[in-house]
Amino acid sequence: MSSYPYFISTLPSLAFGEVPPMSSNEFIENSRQWISIDDWKALKSAASGGENQIKNPAGIYWKNWEETLLNYLAAARAAKLGKDQTPYLNKSGSADSLMKSAVQEAVKAENQQKAEEIIDKLRWAFLDELSATHSFDFNVALSYLLKLKILERWASLDEETGKEALNKSIEKQEK
């Protein structure tokens, strides 16, 4: 039995740049008693990065949009480096002017953190759009979950973690 209205209405609001009010795992566990088992499995799959297992139209739409974004990013980065973009593309897709503009802005950003912020804000706007015409259904739950994942990632970033990632990357290139 599904009780989306109650579940969705109890969720705290989310804002980009704020600390997440709960973890994505807590969200998944809290949702279990309120939504159908199929929707719960789809959310759990999305939380673990298994978006390809989502059969819901909203999940498929998100996956296709994200693939298009990643392709445009790969193409723009390859062009900036003067490389052929073909080997970096996974799937063709049509980007809207907002996506194209954000990708170009991200590629020109002064640092990687600013570039990632631009792209994550684009994702956030897309997720707002995905749930805008819905009130109490899977689209809202999926958008909420994916926004939590964005907030979790930003909350986990710190200088020490960044230095470790950079050092690992340098070590890999030296080998």
Image (cartoon, rainbow, N blue to C red):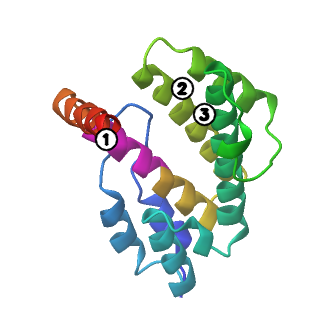
Give the label, 2 or 1, closer to the camera. 1
Give the residue displayed 47% in from the left and 11% down from the top.
110
| 49 over 65 or under it: above or below | below
- Alpha carbon distance from label 2 to label 3: 6 Å
| Image coordinates for residue 131, horizontal then vertical, percent | 65, 52
Q: Secondary structure at mark 1?
A: helix
Residue 34 visible? The answer is yes
Position of 66 with respect to 117 (left or right) is right
* Label 3 Cα neighbours within 10 Å, binned few <14 / some 14-19 / many ≥20: some
* Residue that carries the numbered disc 2 in the rendered image: 118
User: Quarter-wise, where is residue 128 in the image?
Assistant: top right
Quadrant into which the C terminus falls: top left
* Residue that carries the numbered disc 1 in the rendered image: 172
Camera-side residue: 146 or 53?
A: 53
| Image coordinates for residue 2, horizontal then vertical, percent | 54, 81
| 90 over 110 or under it: above or below | below
* Residue that carries the numbered disc 3 in the rendered image: 122
- Alpha carbon distance from label 3 to label 1: 30 Å
Give the residue displayed 64% in from the left and 29% down from the top.
78
Q: Secondary structure at mark 3?
A: helix
Which residues are the magenta region? 147-157
Indicate the amino acid at tag 1: Lys
Q: Considering only order in the chain, which callout, 1 or 3, is on the residue closer to the N terminus?
A: 3
User: Number of callouts in the render?
Assistant: 3
Q: Is residue 107 magenta?
A: no
